[in-house]
Image (cartoon, rainbow, N blue to C red):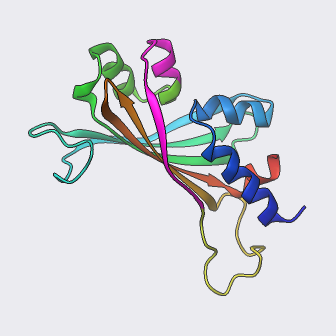
Amino acid sequence: MKQSDSASRFVRLLTGFDGNVTNLLEQIVGAPIQVVDVRQHDIPLPAKSVLYDHGNRTALRRDAVLMSQTGLRLATARSHLALARLPPEVQGALRCGTQPIGRILTRHRLEVFREVVRCRLLAPTPGDADPPSHSDDDPVVERVSQVWRDERPVMEITELFTRICLGLL
């Protein structure tokens, strides 16, 4: 199967899936996944952001998703979190940065709705062949989602999945 066929299947899978990505990747890989909190800090958001609340800052969290056994990077995620819109115990767990976001929401039984805003293949760098020049951990698929609770957006998550994910299908 060509890489582009595998990529198209992966995009279709992600477009139709609105659940916990860590669990999905663990099922595909057949092994535990490790989420590493790369960095997290509070930032102001522009007024045009769907997460904007006057006077409230938003946490920006960046994670790497790794295969536990090998350390290979499967994805990276950049999440904007409107913490003030979440219960205090969820805020605390998210600030710790030691657990995947989906598992925190599940553990606290927080009812949310995840809307996939965009899911697409990333274009190869101009001049690249059908991408043998890319390394396995280059991002090839992007998915942007908004997570809603009580009819208000509480998170915006951008996930970049690597070429390794395509080989797992």
Q: Residue at x 61, y 46 (%)?
A: 15
Q: Determine whether 86 is above or below 61 in the image.
A: above
Q: Which residue lies furthest to the right in this view?
A: 1
Q: Residue at x 35, y 18 (%)?
A: 90
Q: Which quarter of the picture shows residue 153?
A: top left
| Quarter of the image with the N terminus in it | bottom right
Q: Is residue 163 magenta?
A: no
Left or right: residue 64 versus residue 13 is left
Q: Determine whether 110 is above or below 126 in the image.
A: above
Q: Along the line of sight, which residue is nearer the eye, 137 or 101?
A: 101
Q: Residue at x 49, y 13 (%)?
A: 107
Q: Which residue is drawn at 47% across and 21% down?
A: 104
Q: Does the magenta stretch include residue 115?
A: yes
Q: Which quarter of the picture shows residue 18?
A: top right
Q: Where is residue 29 in the image (x, y as percent from the top left)?
A: 78, 36
Left or right: residue 45 versus residue 162 is left
Q: Determine whether 30 is above or below 90 in the image.
A: below
Magenta-tinted stretch? 103-120
Q: Position of residue 20 (x, y in %)?
A: 58, 30
Q: Determine whether 62 is above or below 2 in the image.
A: above
Q: Along the line of sight, which residue is nearer the eye, 70 or 33?
A: 33
Q: Residue furthest front?
A: 151
Q: Which residue lies furthest to the bottom in this view?
A: 127
